[in-house]
């Protein structure tokens, strides 16, 4: 069965929902969302803690509440949802093939918005030696088992990785009566927000060991313990520092990877630095009419920023359908300079006459830092940031006049101040 | 005595310094907003936290109802709140915003999702 829809949004998480709403409000009413779960909301469904929505709604919401706001916006607009439906392929002619209990759906779209989110890095990517017992979970999987299904994952846990999910899970396990023996972080700093270290670890006296990793996993059927060790400057475990911790549960919070198998199928160019698509400021990828946003584009620290970004993608997908908005070959590149991990967008369509917002991450903690945006010839913008750490995305605004005037590639770099 | 407080009210995580003489706040600096100043004072005098948690649903298998306290409770009461939540069992349907139980450690327990 071939059906037609103007905009197909792939993924009904925070990005997909916000993109669909923005596309609809931008004038393109024929928008659908496809999601593989039985309900929209994505990862927000399992994020029962609060702290969402401060930027977007000025109040502190839990994940399910944040999702509910967008669910209501979608039903108010009558945007059609295909839940329990998995997209199996897309191509550059914007044909979407999806599968659900009713069979195969083939949808011809004018524009596609990629909002598939990200997935967790697994044990296999870490090369931890030892056995393969039960009791090793990625932090998000454990979060879902506990918060959505009410299952008990273990009794005594060690958490590897101190990103926000690891920290949030340290608190959740503690609240659910599971003893958290340690949070280990291979880097010399935590990748999570400072406030999460305070309210998730310090509040409960959970120790955070920096420059420390899990060097061995023990146990046959069920995990019996882990060996932790400090690491040297090459991240190699130092044998003398090895220490055994008995535990039946190990949570891995060791990074998120944007999900882009579908993007690849359509020939969308990916950025090795973000793991997501290369986009211009409209969040259009290198394939005409395919847009990307949310954690599928790059991993965000705050859902509020995901919503903002998805709105850009949604608005511009609507514009693309309503009038010609094809990908510009007349674009300049934005590249990362010193101390920068990545930048989004990577390209700027010079036909656009709006102010430009560039999002970036630094590659190590810099403290107080000065950001410089420059062309080969001159500096076009500077920004002083009180605290620049890899865990927090930084936004730099550039005036439209500056962009119009320079018309050449630009590079962003950061310098730590004292 | 000077106490250091990391503000948890927003992701900025301001590093706030509070100058205390015995149990009285003398001076607060380093806050990014007025809420942060209030938080720092509260953190040094009577720390409070909002609590989010889970409640069982009697007539649904493998479904938990996520809930929150409608206001922050004293930090030392966090585990009391959790213990009370563990003892609650509700019947679906429950709607987001429903009050599940009143006055647990001074706060009402509110559903943060709908279970039909």
Image (cartoon, coloured by chain):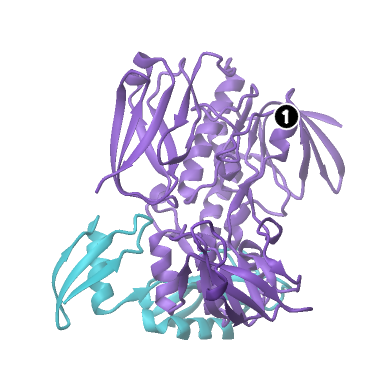
Residue nearer the viewer, A276 or B85: A276
* Residue B99 image position (x, y, % from top left): 50, 72
> Which image quadrant for residue A77?
top right
Q: Nearer the viewer, residue A21 or B34?
A: B34
Q: Which chain is drawn using purple?
A: A
Which corner quadrant holds the N terminus of chain B? bottom left
Mark 1 nearby-residue class (10 Å; few <14, some 14–19, many ≥20): some
- The chain ID associated with circle 1 is A
Would residue A270 be seen by someone viewing this image from the given angle? yes
Is B108 above or below relative to A357?
A: below
| Left or right, A341 with reference to A12 | left
Chain letter for the cyan part: B
Under circle 1, the secondary element is: loop
User: Does the rendering let one see residue B99?
Assistant: no
Please give the count of numbered marks on the rendered protein: 1
Residue visible at 27% across and 79% down in the picture? B46
Q: In this view, does A362 lie above or below A391?
A: above
Q: Is residue A115 left or right of residue B44?
A: right
**Percent x, y of residue B75:** 37, 79
Horizontal side, residue A262 vs residue A241: left or right: right
In the rendering, at what x and y percent does residue A87 appear? 76, 41
Q: Residue at x 47, y 15 (%)?
A: A351
- Residue closer to the observer: B107 or A147: A147
| Residue A411 spot, x, y in % from top left | 41, 28
- Asked which quadrant contains residue A247, the reply is bottom right
Check disc 1 and report the residue beneath it: A266
Residue B43 lies, with reference to residue A57, above or below; the image says: below
**Quadrant where the C terminus of chain B lies?**
bottom right
């Amino acid at each position: 069965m071939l059906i037609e829809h103007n905009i197909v949004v792939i993924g009904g998480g925070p990005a997909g929902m916000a993109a669909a709403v923005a596309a609809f409000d931008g004038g393109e009413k024929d928008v659908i969302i496809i999601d593989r779960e039985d309900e929209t909301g994505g990862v927000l469904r399992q994020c029962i803690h609060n702290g969402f929505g401060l930027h977007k709604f000025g109040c502190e919401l839990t994940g399910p509440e944040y999702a509910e706001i967008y669910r209501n916006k979608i039903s108010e607009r009558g945007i059609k949802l295909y839940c329990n439906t998995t997209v199996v392929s897309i191509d550059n002619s914007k044909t979407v093939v999806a599968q659900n209990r009713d069979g195969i759906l083939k949808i011809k779209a004018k524009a596609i918005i990629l909002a598939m989110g990200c997935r967790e890095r697994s044990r296999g990517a870490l090369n931890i030696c030892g056995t393969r017992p039960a009791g090793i979970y990625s932090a998000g999987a454990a979060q879902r088992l506990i918060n959505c299904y009410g299952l008990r994952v273990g009794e005594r846990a060690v958490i590897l990785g101190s990103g926000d999910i690891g920290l949030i899970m340290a608190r959740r396990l503690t609240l659910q009566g599971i003893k958290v023996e340690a949070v280990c972080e291979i880097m010399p700093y935590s990748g999570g927000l400072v406030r999460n270290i305070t309210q998730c670890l310090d509040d409960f006296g959970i120790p955070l060991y920096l420059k420390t990793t899990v060097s061995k996993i023990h146990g046959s059927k069920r995990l019996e313990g882990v060996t932790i060790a400090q690491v040297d400057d090459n991240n190699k475990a130092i044998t003398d520092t090895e220490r055994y911790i008995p535990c039946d549960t190990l949570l891995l919070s060791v990074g998120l990877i944007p999900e882009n198998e579908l993007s690849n199928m359509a020939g969308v160019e990916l950025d090795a630095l973000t793991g997501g698509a290369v986009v211009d400021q409209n969040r259009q990828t290198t394939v005409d009419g395919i847009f990307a946003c949310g954690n599928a584009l790059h991993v965000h620290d705050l859902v509020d920023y995901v919503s903002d970004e998805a709105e850009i993608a949604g608005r511009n997908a609507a514009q693309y359908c309503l009038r010609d908005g094809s990908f510009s070959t007349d674009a300049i590149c934005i590249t990362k300079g010193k101390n920068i991990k990545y930048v989004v967008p990577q390209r700027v369509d010079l036909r656009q006459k709006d102010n430009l917002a560039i999002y970036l991450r630094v590659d190590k903690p810099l403290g107080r830092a000065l950001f410089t945006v420059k062309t080969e010839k001159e500096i076009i913008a500077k920004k002083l940031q009180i605290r620049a750490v890899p865990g927090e995305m930084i936004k730099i605004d550039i005036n439209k006049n500056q962009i119009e005037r320079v018309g050449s590639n630009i590079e962003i770099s950061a310098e730590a101040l004292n | 005595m000077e106490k250091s407080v990391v503000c948890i009210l927003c992701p900025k995580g301001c590093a706030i310094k509070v100058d205390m003489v015995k149990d009285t706040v003398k001076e607060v600096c380093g806050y990014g907003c007025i809420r942060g100043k209030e938080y720092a004072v509260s953190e040094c005098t009577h720390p409070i936290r909002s609590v989010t948690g889970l409640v069982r649903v009697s007539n649904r298998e493998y479904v938990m109802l996520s809930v929150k306290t409608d206001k922050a409770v004293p930090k030392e009461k966090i585990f009391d709140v959790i213990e009370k939540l563990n003892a609650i069992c509700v019947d679906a349907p429950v709607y987001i915003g429903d009050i599940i139980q009143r006055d647990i450690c001074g706060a009402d327990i509110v559903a943060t999702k709908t279970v039909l």
